[in-house]
Amino acid sequence: MLQTQSDLFNEMRIRVRQTVCPLCHLTLVAGLDNVADAQTGDTFSILKCVQCGLGVTDPAPDEMDRYYANEYHGGRHGMTAKMCDSRRTQIVQQLCSRSSEKRILDVGCGDGTFLRKLAKSGWIAMGVEKYPGLDQFQGVQVLDSLDQAQSTGPYDCITLWHVLEHLPDVNETLASLQTLLKPDGVLVIAVPDFDSIPSKVFGASWLHLDVPRHLFHFTSRSLAGLMEKHGFTHQQLSRSEIEYDLMGIAQSVLNAAGAEPNAFMKRLTGRTTRTAGWRLWMQVVVGTLICVVGALPIWLAGRTRNGGTLIFAARVATPPQGTSN
């Protein structure tokens, strides 16, 4: 039998494995198996820490560029972009209402729409993006690493909107971010909630696992523990970003039903799909109906802290306990 390109890659890739929790230093145990990447078809496992609940994608590919093809970045929020940017801007403005200079760094700034909105409000807006050039960054300076950000800091606010789970060394990242903040600065982190009801219901079909781009899968306990380890006090602001949670439910239902993985989301965000014609439109109709019917319950779930997204704010409190991995 002929092997597919995906099969060959699975055999040949260097298996970079992390068998110990980077937070608790306990041996990771089996979590989810056969979690497929919707873009390439490559399959991965998610190991789990029995103490803090952190999930770790296994194996982590030694080279990630093939998983961040051009289509990964395009049109990601689609018609919900303005709603998303407005909500995030409001969060930052409220947290930093007493800041005078108002200097912000958005790590993983994507196409820069969030930062451009803040720049129009008088913020000195800067971003970090490994894959720049996706859009025009009017009024926003974009760097390609946190090291470069050292020369332009410190910052009143640093944000990571669904970015921390993509980064290969969470301890090194938090240690770097602490040095970039002003003494009274605030760090805002949003990640999918690996301990959420949707995650538990849909398992390997849950949209927001997004392996292998999501190298880590955070719970409220593990994210809080990471912040405490690096000398931050923290506050959980929310457990929902409604457009993420809505799409997560709708697409996960379709994934679990055996449809082309993430075809509904790809169609809405202008990406190519293998499915076409009436089959694709059937997925769009069903996915849209799920979003309409689920909007109120998902909004209520977020209000009662049962949504699928964690948003934490943190401030530097004490010297870090250590940054060992």
Image (tube, rainbow, N blue to C red):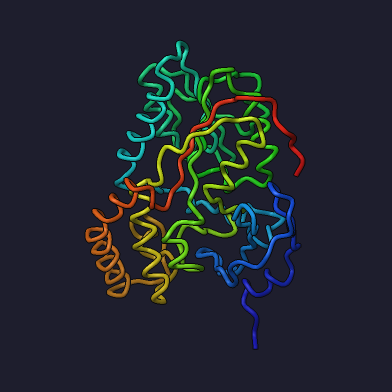
Residue 107: image x %, image y %?
55, 34
The structure residue drawn at horizontal position 63% and vertical position 72%, both measured from the top left corner, is 5
> In this view of the protein, which residue sits in the foreground, 14 or 87?
87
Identify the residue shown where x is 42% and y is 60%: 197
Q: How many labels does the image show?
A: 0
Q: Which residue is drawn at the image coordinates 69% and 25% (left, top)?
A: 319
- The image quadrant of residue 63 is bottom right
Q: Residue 147 at what x, y percent from top left? A: 68, 29
The C terminus is located in which quarter?
Answer: top right
Residue 96 seen in the figure: yes
Q: In this view, does 256 lie above or below 209?
A: below
Q: Is residue 170 above or below residue 17?
A: above
Q: Would you place residue 116 above or below residue 244 in this image?
A: above
Nearer to the camera, 148 or 57? 57
The structure residue drawn at horizontal position 34% and vertical position 71%, both measured from the top left corner, is 276
> Quick check: 252 above or below 208?
below
Residue at far bottom of view: 1
Residue at the top extreme, as displayed = 100
Q: Quadrant of residue 17?
A: bottom right
Residue 76 x, y percent position in the rendering: 41, 48
Residue 305 lies, in percent from the top left, at 38, 48
In this view, the residue in front, 18 or 197, is 197
Evaluate whether residue 133 shows in this view: no
Occupied quadrant, residue 129: top right
| Quarter placement of the N terminus | bottom right
